[in-house]
Image (cartoon, rainbow, N blue to C red):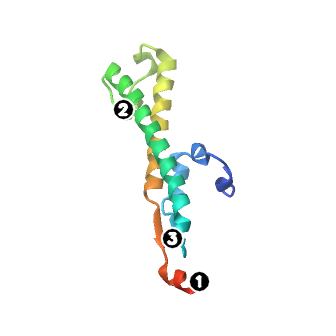
Amino acid sequence: MNHQNLNQKPGFWNLLTAKEVKWMSNIIIKTANPTELAPIQRAITAELKRLEWSYDQTRQRLESFEQKYHCSSSNLVNLAAEDLAGGDLEYVQWAGEYQFFLDLAAQIKCLKDITYVFDKSVYRVYH
């Protein structure tokens, strides 16, 4: 994946996997003007809400599999497709939902770990 153009692609979070998000785990947004942070914070907050909604929806779908088979999603690797009533299709659906859930968790963590810094010393120089 070409990481150079990520900030130019709309909805780029959808393209990242948990492994790829790790390289962005320490994001600091620094500005000399505190008003410049507001639009960035709003955009990140909106994306975080969207991700959290998707996370909750995915968690509900995982819970239905877990209740049906009395097995946690993290233990899915111990099951074979033949163990599931829906066979291969259901196994792939469950595994896909679980991977999506893990990816969403990584993306949410990344956004929640962002630090916003207002540098007063730089602000005084320009104003």
SS class of the residue under badge 1? helix
**Element carrying mark 2:** helix
Residue under numbered circle 3: 34
Q: Earlier in the sequence, mark 3 or mark 2?
A: 3
Q: Quadrant of residue 80?
A: top left
x then y, percent, for residue 89: 52, 19
Question: Residues under labels 1 and 3: Cα distance?
Answer: 13 Å
Q: Nearer the viewer, residue 127 or 81?
A: 127
Mark 2 or mark 1, which has the lower sequence index? 2
| Mark 3 neighbour density, 10 Å: few (under 14) some (14–19) many (20 or more) | some
Callout 2 amino acid: Asn
Q: Are marks 3 and 2 in contact (CB under 8 Å)?
A: no
Query: Residue 32 at what x, y percent from top left?
Result: 54, 76
- Residue 107 in sight from this viewpoint: no
**Which is nearer the eye, 65 or 55?**
55
Q: Does the residue at mark 2 contact the one at mark 1 (Cβ under 8 Å)?
A: no
Q: Which residue is mark 1?
A: 126
Please identify the quadrant where the C terminus is shown: bottom right
Q: Amino acid at mark 3?
A: Pro
Which x, y percent locates residue 29? 52, 67
Distance from label 3 to label 2 (Cα)?
A: 47 Å
109 left or right of 126? left
Residue on which disc 2 sits: 75
Q: CA distance from mark 2 to mark 1?
A: 57 Å
Circle 3: element type: helix
Q: Amino acid at mark 1?
A: Tyr
